Image: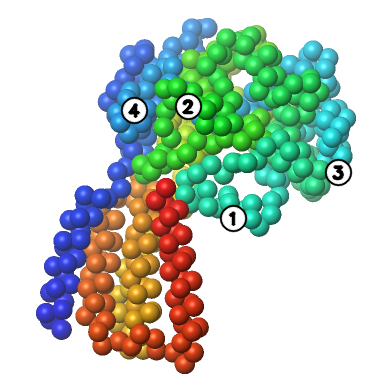
Amino acid sequence: MRRTTVTALVVALAAVLVGVALMPRVARLGPHATGDPDLARATRAAVPDPAGHRGLAVALVENGRIRTAGLGDRDPTGRPVEPGTPFEIGSVTKAFTGMLLADQIAAGGVRPDDRLGATWPTVTGPAGDVTLAELASHRAGLPRLAPGSLLGWARILWSNVSGGNPYAGQGIDTVRSAADRVTPGDGRGEVHYSNLGPSVLGHALAAKAGVAYPDLLQARLLRPLGMAATVTTTRADDLPAGRAQGSRAGGRPLDPWMGAGYAPAGVGMWSTVEDLGRLAAGTLAGTAPGADAATARFTEDGKTRIGYGWFTTRHGDHEVVWHNGGTGGFRSYLGFERVTGRAVVVLGNTDMDVAPIGLRLLGLPAQEAEASPAVQVWLGAGLAVVFTLLGGLSLLSTARRRDLDRATLLTAAVWAFAYLGLGHRMGDWSVVPAWLWPLGVGLSAAATTLAVTRWRALPVVDARVPWRRLLSVASSLFAAALAVAAVST
């Protein structure tokens, strides 16, 4: 027994050393700085912790002047972020769509109380009764996403686990079909954030104008503001050159999001801080097309009101008009304060929140700017701890059982290392110390050593109905293979 224990400890130590070489590499804001040096220094000082960020691009508008800077790396190869580096901007696009509505209202093309069904006649279901203003302000009572089939939800789950694009294959017909099927809920008239609502709105405005949404956006907003670097992508060939690579804060690279259906809500939209600085300056000055969209019209809660896409939130003595965005591997924030005449844009190429940086640059004190960790942060931290330790502990417990067979032991051993892969790729290692993962490797290796010592003495299958045990083992091994395949892409 003592010899087995010593052997297990030696194997565990060797495995820990291997695990150190393979452990997660947390993204960290690099030393590169481009553009305005003063803004770069101010931005770095506003970053609470460089761990979890890889690269940042920033624009600051003061007294009508736009300054831009880049910090860190655009991808793991170390290429520096520049002010002209394209980033995915996600839901900041919803502010674009709200501005298109305000622009079309000003032009006399639509009215805020026009019904969806009248604007987009192919929508004939109950949702056709909601108004354009309700869609723009998340008050239409529509769900966050289009209701899908079991297969569709399975595809989204697979994309989330594998780091792929959850909106692949969801075109305009997907959104229109959803609008036909859904019925506005009891929350209609109250603010409930939705991706479906702004998507329906954007396509409805485009249909009314007789063009596609990207064409309407270009003609009415982007081109007048000189935003030549802002593009809508629906396939890989559309992706801009020199773009940043998105990743999790823990370092795992993620695929871009693309899908024409949800483009008005932010899927597939890329921009630069140079372009968004022009938008912010024009909206703050009231000269941008549809700038009136930023006027707060409806109440969300005691601190926040909403206009057409834009939110207005009070932080102590400061009132900030803003929108943020997040895709698989990017975060974005655009905000301005009318009293000070200052606006800021912050783009990041990991899933670490950048809103606190933007608020600090707007002049808010640290205690007002810092937000509580989001649910996904705690979820990512939990996945890191649980997956790293679960497999080894489970195998250790299984290897010590009296009623044991080789089939059961093999399954536990495979899952011990499958869980390590899941923890490595899905855990948020910007929150949990990365050295925990090599310890998990050592634990699994030690448990495997103990399992090997029992292997020869065990029956292949110890069950009254052997085929049922074998079927259970086969299905478990298949699930482990799927999990490893998902996180290996």
Say which mark, if any, is on residue 126.
3
Q: Earlier in the sequence, mark 1 or mark 2?
A: 2
Residue 252 lies, with reference to residue 39, above or below; the image says below
Q: Earlier in the sequence, mark 3 or mark 2?
A: 2
Q: Nearer the viewer, mark 1 or mark 2?
A: 1
The residue identified by callout 1 is 154
Say what secondary structure mark 2 lies in: strand
Q: Is residue 67 left or right of residue 307?
A: left
Q: Is residue 3 left or right of residue 282?
A: left
The N terminus - image quarter? bottom left
The residue drawn where x is 75% and y is 44% is 178
Q: x%, y% of residue 418?
A: 37, 62
Residue found at the very far top of the displayed protein: 64
Q: Are marks 4 and 3 in contact (CB under 8 Å)?
A: no
Q: Is residue 359 left or right of residue 226?
A: left
Q: Indicate how the structure is coloured in the image.
A: rainbow
Q: Are marks 3 and 2 in contact (CB under 8 Å)?
A: no
Give the total of numbered labels: 4
Q: Can the viewer see residue 139 in this picture?
A: no
Q: Which quadrant would residue 289 be assigned to in this image?
A: top right
Say which mark, if any, is on residue 73.
4
Say what secondary structure mark 3 lies in: helix
Q: Earlier in the sequence, mark 1 or mark 4?
A: 4
Mark 2 residue type: Phe
Circle 3: is it few (<14), some (14-19), or many (20+) Cα within 10 Å?
some
Residue 175 lies, with reference to residue 102, above or below; the image says below
The residue drawn where x is 38% and y is 79% is 408
Measure the C-alpha gap from mark 1 to mark 4.
Answer: 34 Å
